Each structure stands twice: as structure tokens, then as C-alpha cells.
Image (cartoon, rainbow, N blue to C red):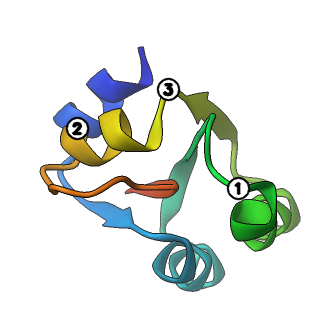
Amino acid sequence: MSYDKVLQARNIIVGTKQTVKALKSGTISEVLIAEDADHRAVEKVINAALEYKVPVTRAGSMKSLGKACGIDVGAAAVAISI
């Protein structure tokens, strides 16, 4: 499951704005989007990932994705650094 990737990654970026910024820097190998995230909230992330040819993987819930990142709140988007 994609949570394993988050747990094993050395560097992760959590949040939609930070993920878009990181995608523009060219240091991202994969983006994870929570299934229950509001489409409007993650639309910019998905478009940026497509533009920079970074794979997008759907993850479970925002709560579970946030927990995998070690935060107490849900996460709509997470980027895994190279």
C-alpha cells in the first residue's frame, strides 16, 4: 500500500500548497492524494503533477494518510522527495 512508501520515505512534503511548490522545484518522485479529499482542494496538485510528469497515487482516507505522515490531522496530499 502507498502508506508504506510514506513510512519508508526519507523526505515527505505534506499539504497541497507545499506539494505544488515542491513539484515546481523538480524534487518529487511521487504524489499521494487521499481518496476522500475534496477534488477542488487537490486539483492544482494533480494538474502540477501531470505537468511535471510525476505519478499520482490514490491513497485511503485523509486521516490515515496524515497518520502515516506522523501528523494528528488529515492530509489531502503528500509528496515523496527523490
Q: Can you say which quadrant of the picture contains the C terminus? A: bottom left
Report the residue marked by disc 2.
Answer: 68
Task: Please report the residue visible at 43 percent of the width from the left and 24 percent of the height from the top.
Answer: 2
Residue 70: % across, % down: 12, 50
On screen, residue 9 versus residue 15, left or right, reads left
Upstream in sequence: badge 2 or badge 3: 3
Asked whether 13 or 51 is in front, the reply is 13
Question: Quick one: which residue is furthest to the top in this view?
Answer: 1
Checking the image for residue 81, the label placed there is: none
Q: Mark 3: which secondary structure?
A: loop
Q: Mark 1: which secondary structure?
A: loop
Task: Give me the C-alpha separation between circle 1 and circle 2.
Answer: 19 Å
The reply to whether dot 1 and dot 3 touch (C-beta < 8 Å) is no
Residue 15: % across, % down: 44, 70
Upstream in sequence: badge 1 or badge 3: 1
Q: Residues within 10 Å of mark 1 (few under 14, many from 20)?
A: few
* Residue 82 visible (yes or no): no
Upstream in sequence: badge 1 or badge 2: 1
Checking the image for residue 38, the label placed there is: 1
Q: Residues within 10 Å of mark 2 (few under 14, many from 20)?
A: some
Task: Give me the C-alpha separation between circle 1 and circle 3.
Answer: 13 Å
Up the image or down, 71 lies above or below 7; here it is below
Asked whether 71 or 10 is in front, the reply is 71
Report the residue marked by disc 3.
Answer: 60
Residue 51: % across, % down: 87, 67
On screen, residue 5 versus residue 33, left or right, reads left
